[in-house]
Image (spheres, rainbow, N blue to C red):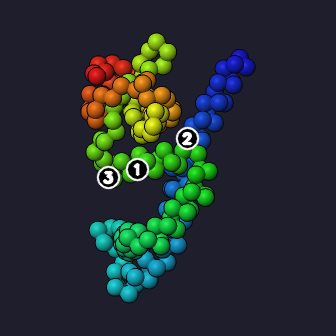
Amino acid sequence: MSKIFSHFRDTILSGIIFLIPVFVIIVIIQKFYGKLTGFGQQLATMLGIKTVAGVGAAAIGTTILMVVFFYACGLLVKFTMFTNMRSWLENKVLIYIPGYLNYKVKMEEKLMPKTENRVAALIRTGDIDRPGFLMHREKSKCTVFIPNTPDTDSGQVWIVDEHLVRELGIADKNFLDGIRHSGKNLKF
């Protein structure tokens, strides 16, 4: 019984840690929306609107203000000073939020799909070859990335001798799908 309770407790704690970044973002947006509600009400009053299609004008005004604010922030990103400030905040504060970097990378991938430019490779470890990516080559050493399955963007970074790496070329869809599906139909 103790083992079941321990498993149950650990699973719940893992779920909470997994969701902390999502909760943080939701709370920040709620607080921001709450602060803007007063301005949204003033905007609606200035325009003389009480409701639109059954929705309160304050809610519509607040939503419009949020969209304008996010657009303005998008414009600020084009300035180096603001980009440096955001990078500093991420590197000094946000890295301590569990899972933040993983969520950030996934969000960036969804917003700006990237073209695959990693070099697929087989990395010899003992008597076996592991699929991975050649990231950098210098002198007689190579930096390789060994991805996890199914998330090929997380894994381990290894430094290995050059003769242990066999390049396969730019990673294609078949190679990535093979890794994501734990080796099923891995083509190389």
Residue 41 locus on image (x, y percent): 44, 79
- State the SS at label 3: loop
User: Hey, what amino acid is under mark 1?
Assistant: Met
Q: Is residue 8 left or right of residue 70?
A: right
Residue 170 locus on image (x, y percent): 28, 35
Relative to 7, residue 12 above or below: below
Q: Determine which residue is flagged by label 1.
A: 107
Q: Residues within 10 Å of mark 1 (few under 14, many from 20)?
A: few
Furthest toward the top, the residue is 127
Residue 127 locus on image (x, y percent): 46, 12
Mark before the other along the chain sequence, 3 or 1: 1
Question: Cα distance, mark 3 to mark 1?
Answer: 8 Å
When asked about the image quadrant of residue 60, the answer is: bottom left
* Residue placed most toward the observer, 177 or 59: 177
User: Hey, what amino acid is under mark 3?
Assistant: Met
Evaluate whether residue 164 shows in this view. yes
Q: Residue at x 30, y 72 (%)?
A: 52
Mark before the other along the chain sequence, 2 or 1: 2
Relative to 140, residue 59 above or below: below
Q: Residue at x 69, y 19 (%)?
A: 3
Question: Cα distance, mark 3 to mark 2?
Answer: 24 Å
Q: Is residue 111 left or right of residue 101?
A: left
Relative to 70, residue 126 above or below: above
The numbered mark at residue 112 is 3
Which quadrant, please, contains the C terminus?
Answer: top left
Furthest toward the front, the residue is 139
- State the SS at label 1: helix
Residue 53 locus on image (x, y percent): 29, 68
The numbered mark at residue 18 is 2
